[in-house]
Protein backbone atom coordinates (compact mmCIF):
# COMPACT_ATOMS: atom_id res chain seq x y z
CA UNK A 1 0.00 0.00 0.00
CA UNK A 2 1.34 3.40 -0.98
CA UNK A 3 0.93 6.27 1.49
CA UNK A 4 -0.50 9.70 0.83
CA UNK A 5 2.97 11.27 0.55
CA UNK A 6 4.02 8.94 -2.23
CA UNK A 7 0.70 9.31 -4.01
CA UNK A 8 0.92 13.10 -3.93
CA UNK A 9 4.26 12.84 -5.70
CA UNK A 10 3.12 10.28 -8.27
CA UNK A 11 -0.34 11.36 -9.30
CA UNK A 12 -0.59 13.24 -12.56
CA UNK A 13 -3.90 15.06 -12.75
CA UNK A 14 -5.86 15.99 -15.80
CA UNK A 15 -6.28 19.58 -14.63
CA UNK A 16 -4.57 22.44 -16.42
CA UNK A 17 -4.28 26.20 -16.11
CA UNK A 18 -5.04 27.74 -12.74
CA UNK A 19 -5.55 24.41 -11.01
CA UNK A 20 -2.09 23.30 -12.07
CA UNK A 21 -0.79 25.93 -9.63
CA UNK A 22 -2.77 24.34 -6.78
CA UNK A 23 0.00 22.05 -5.61
CA UNK A 24 2.21 21.97 -2.55
CA UNK A 25 5.28 22.73 -4.68
CA UNK A 26 3.48 25.58 -6.44
CA UNK A 27 2.55 27.21 -3.12
CA UNK A 28 5.46 26.27 -0.89
CA UNK A 29 6.30 29.88 0.05
CA UNK A 30 2.76 30.40 1.37
CA UNK A 31 2.80 27.03 3.09
CA UNK A 32 6.00 27.83 5.00
CA UNK A 33 3.76 30.11 7.07
CA UNK A 34 2.50 26.90 8.72
CA UNK A 35 5.72 26.72 10.72
CA UNK A 36 4.64 27.23 14.31
CA UNK A 37 6.92 30.20 15.01
CA UNK A 38 5.53 32.04 12.00
CA UNK A 39 1.91 30.85 12.42
CA UNK A 40 1.75 32.38 15.91
CA UNK A 41 2.44 35.88 14.60
CA UNK A 42 0.08 35.80 11.61
CA UNK A 43 -3.17 37.72 11.74
CA UNK A 44 -6.36 35.68 11.49
CA UNK A 45 -6.82 37.01 7.95
CA UNK A 46 -3.34 35.81 6.98
CA UNK A 47 -4.05 32.42 8.54
CA UNK A 48 -7.27 32.20 6.51
CA UNK A 49 -5.30 32.92 3.33
CA UNK A 50 -2.97 30.02 4.14
CA UNK A 51 -5.94 27.74 4.88
CA UNK A 52 -7.64 28.72 1.62
CA UNK A 53 -4.43 27.77 -0.18
CA UNK A 54 -4.40 24.40 1.60
CA UNK A 55 -8.07 23.90 0.74
CA UNK A 56 -7.41 24.65 -2.93
CA UNK A 57 -4.48 22.21 -2.99
CA UNK A 58 -6.47 19.47 -1.27
CA UNK A 59 -9.51 20.04 -3.48
CA UNK A 60 -7.38 19.67 -6.59
CA UNK A 61 -5.54 16.63 -5.22
CA UNK A 62 -8.79 14.86 -4.33
CA UNK A 63 -10.43 15.87 -7.62
CA UNK A 64 -13.28 17.82 -6.03
CA UNK A 65 -15.09 19.65 -8.85
CA UNK A 66 -16.57 22.37 -6.60
CA UNK A 67 -14.67 25.43 -5.43
CA UNK A 68 -14.37 25.13 -1.68
CA UNK A 69 -14.20 28.19 0.54
CA UNK A 70 -12.94 28.57 4.08
CA UNK A 71 -14.49 30.90 6.63
CA UNK A 72 -13.79 31.63 10.28
CA UNK A 73 -16.91 31.33 12.37
CA UNK A 74 -17.95 31.16 15.99
CA UNK A 75 -18.59 27.47 16.62
CA UNK A 76 -19.29 25.46 19.74
CA UNK A 77 -16.25 25.27 22.02
CA UNK A 78 -15.85 21.57 21.27
CA UNK A 79 -16.08 22.02 17.48
CA UNK A 80 -12.76 22.85 15.84
CA UNK A 81 -14.11 22.95 12.29
CA UNK A 82 -17.08 21.84 10.22
CA UNK A 83 -18.12 21.43 6.59
CA UNK A 84 -21.42 22.46 4.99
CA UNK A 85 -21.88 20.66 1.69
CA UNK A 86 -24.79 22.81 0.49
CA UNK A 87 -22.44 25.81 0.17
CA UNK A 88 -19.14 23.90 -0.17
CA UNK A 89 -17.83 25.84 2.83
CA UNK A 90 -15.38 24.81 5.52
CA UNK A 91 -15.81 26.63 8.81
CA UNK A 92 -12.90 27.00 11.21
CA UNK A 93 -13.66 27.85 14.83
CA UNK A 94 -12.55 31.48 15.33
CA UNK A 95 -10.94 30.74 18.71
CA UNK A 96 -9.14 27.70 17.32
CA UNK A 97 -7.91 29.74 14.35
CA UNK A 98 -6.57 32.46 16.65
CA UNK A 99 -4.92 30.25 19.24
CA UNK A 100 -4.60 26.74 17.86
CA UNK A 101 -1.25 25.22 16.88
CA UNK A 102 -0.56 25.38 13.15
CA UNK A 103 -0.45 21.62 12.59
CA UNK A 104 -3.73 21.07 14.44
CA UNK A 105 -5.49 23.79 12.43
CA UNK A 106 -4.00 22.33 9.23
CA UNK A 107 -5.22 18.87 10.22
CA UNK A 108 -8.73 20.19 10.90
CA UNK A 109 -8.77 21.90 7.50
CA UNK A 110 -7.68 18.72 5.69
CA UNK A 111 -10.27 16.74 7.68
CA UNK A 112 -13.08 19.00 6.47
CA UNK A 113 -11.87 18.95 2.86
CA UNK A 114 -11.99 15.17 3.06
CA UNK A 115 -15.65 15.41 4.07
CA UNK A 116 -16.25 17.39 0.86
CA UNK A 117 -14.58 14.54 -1.03
CA UNK A 118 -16.76 11.97 0.75
CA UNK A 119 -19.86 13.87 -0.34
CA UNK A 120 -18.65 13.74 -3.96
CA UNK A 121 -18.14 9.97 -3.62
CA UNK A 122 -21.73 9.65 -2.39
CA UNK A 123 -22.94 11.76 -5.33
CA UNK A 124 -21.03 9.52 -7.75
CA UNK A 125 -22.60 6.44 -6.16
CA UNK A 126 -26.13 7.84 -6.51
CA UNK A 127 -25.49 8.71 -10.17
CA UNK A 128 -23.89 5.37 -11.01
CA UNK A 129 -25.64 2.79 -13.15
CA UNK A 130 -27.43 0.24 -10.94
CA UNK A 131 -25.25 -2.53 -12.37
CA UNK A 132 -22.14 -0.69 -11.17
CA UNK A 133 -23.22 0.04 -7.60
CA UNK A 134 -21.82 -3.27 -6.33
CA UNK A 135 -18.31 -2.31 -7.41
CA UNK A 136 -15.77 -2.27 -4.58
CA UNK A 137 -15.13 1.43 -5.22
CA UNK A 138 -18.67 2.28 -4.06
CA UNK A 139 -18.72 0.26 -0.82
CA UNK A 140 -17.65 3.16 1.36
CA UNK A 141 -19.89 5.51 -0.60
CA UNK A 142 -22.94 3.54 0.48
CA UNK A 143 -21.76 3.61 4.09
CA UNK A 144 -21.00 7.35 3.93
CA UNK A 145 -24.42 7.96 2.41
CA UNK A 146 -26.16 6.19 5.28
CA UNK A 147 -24.03 8.02 7.84
CA UNK A 148 -24.70 11.42 6.26
CA UNK A 149 -28.45 10.69 6.24
CA UNK A 150 -28.35 9.82 9.96
CA UNK A 151 -25.34 11.89 10.98
CA UNK A 152 -24.50 12.04 14.68
CA UNK A 153 -22.57 15.12 15.79
CA UNK A 154 -20.05 15.13 18.59
CA UNK A 155 -22.42 17.13 20.76
CA UNK A 156 -25.18 14.52 20.40
CA UNK A 157 -23.13 11.43 21.18
CA UNK A 158 -19.36 11.70 21.05
CA UNK A 159 -18.66 7.96 20.83
CA UNK A 160 -21.11 7.46 17.96
CA UNK A 161 -19.74 10.54 16.20
CA UNK A 162 -16.13 9.42 16.64
CA UNK A 163 -16.76 5.88 15.37
CA UNK A 164 -18.66 6.81 12.20
CA UNK A 165 -16.66 5.57 9.20
CA UNK A 166 -16.78 9.01 7.56
CA UNK A 167 -15.07 10.48 10.65
CA UNK A 168 -12.54 7.66 10.99
CA UNK A 169 -11.52 8.04 7.34
CA UNK A 170 -11.39 11.86 7.52
CA UNK A 171 -9.20 11.73 10.63
CA UNK A 172 -6.84 9.23 9.02
CA UNK A 173 -6.56 11.18 5.79
CA UNK A 174 -6.09 14.51 7.56
CA UNK A 175 -3.34 13.24 9.87
CA UNK A 176 -1.42 11.80 6.92
CA UNK A 177 -1.94 14.92 4.79
CA UNK A 178 -0.82 17.26 7.59
CA UNK A 179 2.32 15.16 8.11
CA UNK A 180 3.00 15.39 4.38
CA UNK A 181 2.67 19.19 4.39
CA UNK A 182 5.04 19.53 7.34
CA UNK A 183 7.59 17.15 5.78
CA UNK A 184 7.46 18.97 2.45
CA UNK A 185 7.89 22.34 4.20
CA UNK A 186 10.86 21.02 6.19
CA UNK A 187 12.46 19.62 3.01
CA UNK A 188 12.00 22.95 1.23
CA UNK A 189 13.56 24.90 4.09
CA UNK A 190 16.57 22.54 4.16
CA UNK A 191 17.36 23.22 0.48
Image (spheres, rainbow, N blue to C red):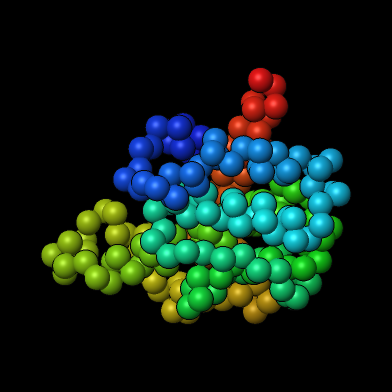
Question: On the image, which quarter does residue 141 sit in?
Answer: bottom left
**Where residue 40 sits: x, y (%)?**
84, 49
**Where residue 68 sits: x, y (%)?**
51, 64
Position above or below: 169 against 7: below
Between 113 and 79, the one lying in front of the other is 113
Between 24 and 111, the one lying in front of the other is 24
Q: Is residue 186 left or right of residue 84?
A: right
Name the residue at 58% across, 41% down: 27
Name the residue at 78% across, 60% down: 44
Name the residue at 40% across, 32% down: 10
Residue lying furthest left in this view? 131
**Where residue 29 sits: x, y (%)?**
66, 38
**Where residue 186 sits: x, y (%)?**
68, 29
Quadrant containing the C terminus in the rendered view: top right
Question: On the image, which quarter does residue 122 sit in?
Answer: bottom left
Position above or below: 130 against 65: below
Position above or below: 51 against 129: above
Question: On the image, which quarter does residue 149 sit in?
Answer: bottom left
Between 37 and 6, the one lying in front of the other is 37
Q: Is residue 178 left or right of residue 72?
A: left
Between 141 and 10, the one lying in front of the other is 10
Residue 74 appears in the rendering: yes
Residue 159 appears in the rendering: no
Q: Is residue 124 left or right of residue 143?
A: left
| Image mark count | 0
Residue lying furthest top in this view? 191
Amino acid sequence: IVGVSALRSLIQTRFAGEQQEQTIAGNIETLTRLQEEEWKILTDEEKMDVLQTVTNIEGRYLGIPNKLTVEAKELLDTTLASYLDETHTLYINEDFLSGGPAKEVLTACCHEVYHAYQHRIVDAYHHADEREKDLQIYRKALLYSKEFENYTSGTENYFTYYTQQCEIDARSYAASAADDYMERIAEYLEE
